[in-house]
Amino acid sequence: MKVGIDKLGFYTPETYIDMTELANARGEDPAKYLIGIGQRKQAIAPVTQDVVTMAANAATKILTPADKQSIKMVLFGTESGVDNSKATAVYLQTLLGLSADVRAVEIKQACYGATAGVQMACDYVRSHPTASVLVIGADIARYGLNTPGEVTQGAGAVAMLIKADPDLIELEAESVFHSADVMDFWRPLYRSEALVDGHYSNNVYIDFFNQTWQEFQNRTDTNISDFDAFLFHLPYTKMGLKALRTITSDDQHSQDLLTEFEAAKKFNAEVGNIYTGSLYLSLISWLVNSQTLASGNHVGFFSFGSGAQGEFFAGNVGPSTQLQNLKMQMEASLNQRRQISIKEYEAMFEARRPFEAGDYAFDLSEEKAQFYLKGQQNHQLL
Ligand code: CAA
């Protein structure tokens, strides 16, 4: 039985900053941000968007009434939840008008949560073939103003419908995971910005990729020549390139894989790090931008969440009848955004601090999304 990703929906806030402007403001050479880090733009979330509203805005683009009927689980991967107790998935269930006959939970492991969701969803569908599962990867990546991590921030949500006989990607059951308790990136409960040992986190990422990829080859008796593309968690696009380069050489197949990577990084360079959704944004980017995409293409996925958890898994491109819709969706998402100045961004960044207790209403004059946050009342988000 084939199981995997049937539909992909994406949402990113309507405001962004340009990385050349950020470099100039921070006294850095723009080439460092554009080439050394590999980012062009960074999505900035207004206070009226959080992970729940972003996820709802992403999911509503793909779900038909029949899809909603078939959804039996909502698995929400995020490290930027909106409540210390209640799961983002439960808010989402209400916003999307899903039935009450649903298991709705939140999954946290830094940038890896959505992959845990995808794998659990596939396992569930394998034993319940008529059911489908909504998996979300949504985050607002925050390191802080004037920090080395600032250039690797971003915001957005990917919504995935997992079901039998999927249209976009059929996922193989074999996958290799690796976990170790390391302090490369973390966010204590009292902080809204991550703490990170940046260069160490790069090394942990590469180490986990090499370990899981090696073990995957051993278990499946495959090698690099069996793959048409490799997709990576992209905290910044150069990170995936660094990992890919550890397994490529000068031969033609390696050059082809590097060309596919160019397609797979394009949208991530325009949005920034969306933590747990980043691998799946890269999947969208590859599906939309690859010049050689064909049904049956074999693709490897490397998912990584600091702290740390890594997983290598694989899949095949399905019939992809919805590719045109996905292209139009991405054009609308990325081309209708508004660039803001670094000064405006800094003010928006400060406004996003954890809300204080009290009642307040946000200014909604700039908000164009279908789902948005209106404010807070009686200790509840509106
Ligand atoms: N022109 C071109 N390239 C330049 C340049 C210039 N003028 N100046 C510097 N560069 C290059 C450097 O050579 C370097 O490239 P390589 O890594 O290929 O050598 C690159 O630009 C970055 O330079 P630095 O390493 O000096 O940059 P930095 O010290 O400011 O830190 C960083 C970079 C560690 C990625 C930092 O942005 C950071 O901490 N980011 C957050 C952590 C992160 O994203 N880690 C990734 C792995 S963890 C993960 O994946 C989970 C997650 O999502 C967080």
Image (spheres, rainbow, N blue to C red):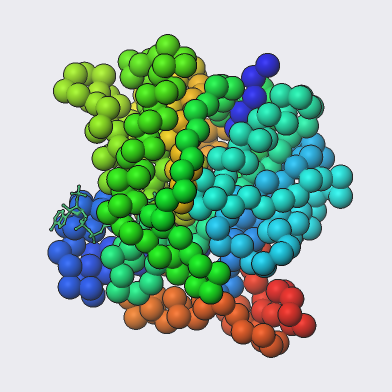
Residue 142 image position (x, y, % from top left): 43, 66
**Taking 359 as reference, is 289 left or right?**
left
Residue at the extreme front of the image, as rendered: 181
- Is 294 located above or below residue 190 in the figure? above
Q: Residue at x 23, y 75 (%)?
A: 25
Residue at image location 67% in from the left, 85% down from the top: 357
State which quadrant residue 41 falls in: bottom left
- Image-quadrant location for residue 90: bottom right
Quarter occupied by the C terminus: bottom right
Q: Nearer the viewer, residue 51 or 305?
A: 305
Is residue 306 shown to the viewer in this render? Answer: no
Which residue is found at the position 50% from the left and 33% from the top? 177
Q: Residue at x 71, y 24 (%)?
A: 126
Point out residue 376 in the picture as x, y percentages from the top left corner. Answer: 69, 80
Asked if residue 326 lies left or right of residue 164, the reply is left
Q: Position of residue 297 (x, y in %)?
A: 45, 20
Q: Is residue 345 visible?
A: yes
- On screen, residue 51 above or below 189: above
- In this rendering, is residue 46 above or below 265? below
Where, by quadrant of the figure, is residue 337 drawn? bottom left
Judged from the image, the quadrant occupied by ligand 1 is bottom left
Give coordinates of residue 127: x percent, y percent: 76, 24
Q: Quadrant of the N terminus?
A: top right
Instruction: Tally the numbered discs.
Output: 0
Q: Is residue 277 above or below residue 260?
A: below
